[in-house]
Amino acid sequence: MEAIKVAGNTIVAGVDPAGVVTVGTRDMKEGWIIFFDNPRKKPFESFPLTIERDRISVRKDGKHTSIVVGGARAGPFAGDFVFTVYPGSRLIKAAMVMATRREATAYTFDAGLTAPSATPLPWRSIAYTDLNDTLVRREGDASQGPATSPQVRGRMIIAEGAAGSGALGIVPPPHRYFYPLDYANNDNATWYGSDYRNLAGRTGFGVRQTLEGDNRWVPWVNAPVGTRQDMDIFYLPDPGDAASTTAAAMTLTRNDRFKSLDGYRTFSSHYHVEHATDFLNKARFQQAKGVPVGLEKPDFVKRFNAMNVEIVHLAELHLSREDLNRAGDRLTLLKTIHAETARLSDDRLLLLPGEEPNVHLGGHWLSLFPKPVFWTLDRTPQQPFVEDDPTLGKVYHVGSQQDVLNLMKAENGLMWTAHPRIKSSYGFPDAYRNQPFFKSDRFLGGAWKSMPADYSQARLGSRVLDLLDDMNNWAADPSERKFTPGEVDVFQITRDSELYAHMNINYMRLPGPLPTHATGWASVTDALRGGRFFTTTGEVLIPSFTVNGAQSGEDTAGGTVTVRATIEGTFPLAYAEIVSGDGKKVFRDRVDLTDTAPFGSRIIERRIGMRGRTWARLEVWDVATNGAFTQPVFLGRR
């Protein structure tokens, strides 16, 4: 590229797009919907990007304009290199859009900009924010040494041009770029310097995907044969320096913070922080009678506060029986969970006790009650379903699907499938869709997360979005309606975790003060059961969505309906889909949003014939594949 400029000033000149694609092999025993895989443990190979420039064309997608450069190749992948610009935005999307004919391919990609090492440096310095929140600059030769991959805040790296000429940030899509892992570690997501991996004789900077992940299950990214994988990053030119560029990039994620919306509370679910066992083990080793040292305010609480997460549903006791027994018996563990979630809650955070019990139903599932409940996971033939403990009160014992359902009915609890159709819930909830407990209104549905990764798709988490549609097409009665709250499903959270990349959030219609442990949180479980929420990666918001004036979870007349929504986003928006079903089929009405300015809002209003349909919902996606989706509104047949 001749130059990248901002406000008429050249930031960098004589640079080229760079990429390294690492190609491994997917375990196909369960097809493409897989998490339990480790292509890093099988033979893999890395290939540098080459661009033959055999053709150049300009393509329009609504108001978005792309320059398509043909002849892009990296090992078995081939296709185009595509630059896309957006009206009213300085963002430039730079993507290797390539497909492979290689079977069972899993891959990662690194991307950035480089120049020949023998030529004068095209930038004055390389800059990033380190884990101490300090802006670090590597000037001159210090930016040209052997390539290194620092840990950074904000998932970005920046080149500063000559004094006063501006700076250029490289910013990955904040969620999609980070394939799913159990631990939200900060995995050295940037690089700079010379001879990075396959880029011999080149000096550059960019972003990278970890090959080794958290050293557990590390599934990389799916590339089914023939699918055009959109391996994209963003260039962000800025007229200021690295600090100004960082601030501009962080506005795209609202500084990794979830915006407050009137009438809503932010709700997040499925965290294996294992605070109860940590508390009991530390108390024993420290001989502590009160709160053990180091757990006064754990890092996970501080992180939730910083991100404006107001209600958090834990998934405790997800450990081996040996580890649990070492900490304490089950009722002691539950008592600790109840006491500690109460202690750590305040007027900013409601921490809710919860588990991933994974017994009796099949697959993995989550539980949530509107108040503390004591129960055990098994029941002997002579043991009563419920008994009174002189200290704890009611204690339930469950030994079957019917016992679980009876417990949920007795205590007005909710259960739903964790990571449906993948991981240890592969084949669920489909396998028990006809069971009484699933058809009960105590079974909420399944939890949404972007997993697995597949960059050929223009939305995230289609595995569960499709399930949401299927479940409501299955429903033969209003009591069988199902919903899909977002889940995060990560383990330990520390000060330095790259948590935002792996997060989603549920905006729950919950006016008034935050519920408390003193009064209970039935309003939270009622809002979940009523479908009164929308789910988002954070950048795209749907403050209002109605069908004929009815909100998600509510009923309205069918026939020709009026769909109305207020939406907003930080990145330029791409499209919306009004999704509906008739009990058998799913229908999609696409709405072009390319005329929406970044950091803009707009109203969608459509009259749509939905004769025979039984439900309708909305999805909204932006150019970085960040998105939001509502729960259904239910339609009377006409």
Image: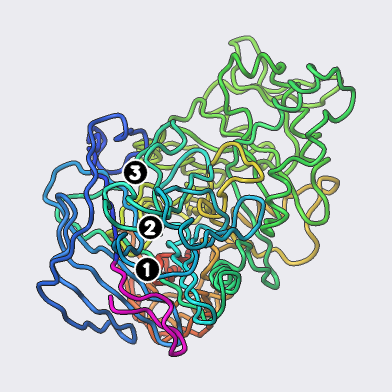
Q: Of the residues shown, which amino acid type is indicated by label 1? A: Val
Q: Which residue is mark 2?
A: 469
Q: Which mark is residue 539?
A: none
Residue reaching furthest right? 289
Residue at 29 percent across and 83 percent down: it is 65
Q: Is residue 583 left or right of residue 392?
A: left
- Estimate the x, y position of residue 284 in percent, counting from the top left: 79, 17
Does residue 366 belong to the magenta stretch? no
Label 1, secondary structure: give it: strand
Question: Start and end of the magenta stretch?
Answer: 1-16
Task: Judge whether 564 appears above or below 23 on screen.
Answer: below
Binning the other alpha carbons within 10 Å of mark 2 as few (below 14), some (14 to 19) or many (20 upward) gives many
The CA span between labels 1 and 3 is: 29 Å
Q: Of the residues shown, which amino acid type is indicated by label 3? A: Trp
Name the N-terminal-most of marks 3 and 2.
3
The CA span between labels 2 and 1 is: 8 Å
Q: Which mark is residue 579?
A: 1
Residue at 26 percent across and 43 percent down: it is 106
Residue 253: name its quadrant: bottom right
- Estimate the x, y position of residue 62 in percent, counting from the top left: 31, 85
- Estimate the x, y position of residue 531 in percent, counting from the top left: 56, 59
User: Between tags 1 and 3, which lies in front?
Assistant: 3
